[in-house]
Amino acid sequence: MRITKREVIFSVVIVCLMLVFGIMISGKINDSLMNKYQEYNTALQIDNDSSLFEYGMRTNIGNAFVYGELAAVDSVTYPEIGGEYASATKVTERYTKHTRTVTKTKTVNGKTQTYTEVETYWTWDEIDRDHIHVETITFLGKEFSYGTINHFPEHYIDTLDAGYHLRDVYYGSDILYEGTLYAVLADDTISETSFYCEKTIDETIEHLETEWQLVLFWVFWIILTGFAVYGFYYIDNRWLE
């Protein structure tokens, strides 16, 4: 690839333009982050105080960080695995045979030859899924419908044989967590909830106020700028001559 002086000059212009647009976009992102940070810093903080939590919901206090215990009122399980879970999932899988065409090479009399070959392989493929969960959860002693606070992550429990080339894989979530809830407290309930497991209020705010969005944007923008310059060099630029 031959690079001329005019192409170098024009690529500098491209970089400058990308930098200007990048600064403008990052400024918008930063303004949005500052608004969110102001929202976090003005939110009510409730540290394991159920009466203040209920008062906030009753009086429409708005945004709040609330530290406390999140729990399932009851529990669910599948009889074949036992245990107690806030939610559980049974995934039925079939051991299935597949074929694929692969390209290979071999050397014959000092010459490399390319050929295709049909290859057989087996995988466990999902054919059915069942999910169960409790109906009611509590946070700081206040009852809510399951799903109001969307934090019951499931982990692997067990795998059981279900017949010829079949198996059932089980996943379940714990029934008790502690952490910080960020939510809107109004109308005697909560909404727009996010739960930060095993984090105090201060740790949650520090986590939310990290400016990873700006870092991610500039990494993406620098890569995009590099591709733009490379693409410019790659195309036919006779119009510059």
Image (spheres, rainbow, N blue to C red):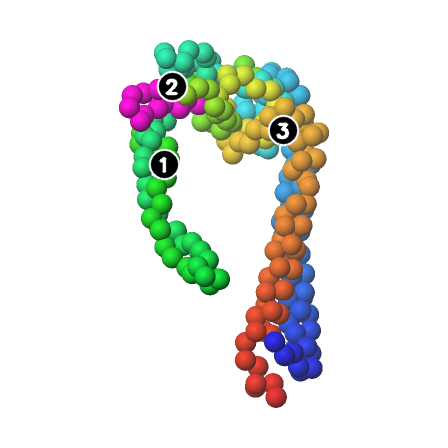
Q: Position of residue 234 (x, y in %)?
A: 57, 73
User: Within the magenta stretch, is there residue 64?
Assistant: no
Magenta stretch: give its range: 161-171
What residue is pinned by disc 2? 160
Which numbered disc, 1 or 2, marks the residue that appears first in the sequence? 1
CA separation in Å, label 2 and label 3: 42 Å
Which residue position is annotated with label 3? 65
Kindly identify which residue carries mark 1. Answer: 122
Query: Looking at the picture, how far across and down is residue 71, in whole percent?
Result: 52, 17
Of badges 3 and 1, the one in the foreground is: 1
Give, as a three-letter code, the residue at label 3.
Phe
Q: Secondary structure at mark 2?
A: strand
The Cα atoms of the two marked residues, 1 and 2, are separated by: 19 Å
Q: On the rendered image, what quadrant is the C terminus found in? A: bottom right
Q: Are marks 1 and 2 in contact (CB under 8 Å)?
A: no
The residue drawn where x is 41% and y is 21% is 159
Side of 179 where 171 appears, left or right = left
For the point 67% across and 69% down, the residue is: 15
Q: Residues within 10 Å of mark 2 (few under 14, many from 20)?
A: few
Which numbered disc, 1 or 2, marks the residue closer to the eye? Answer: 1
Q: Look at the image and say whether residue 162 sits in the magenta stretch.
A: yes
- Type of secondary structure dominating the magenta stretch: strand
| Residue 190 location (% of width, % of height) | 51, 27
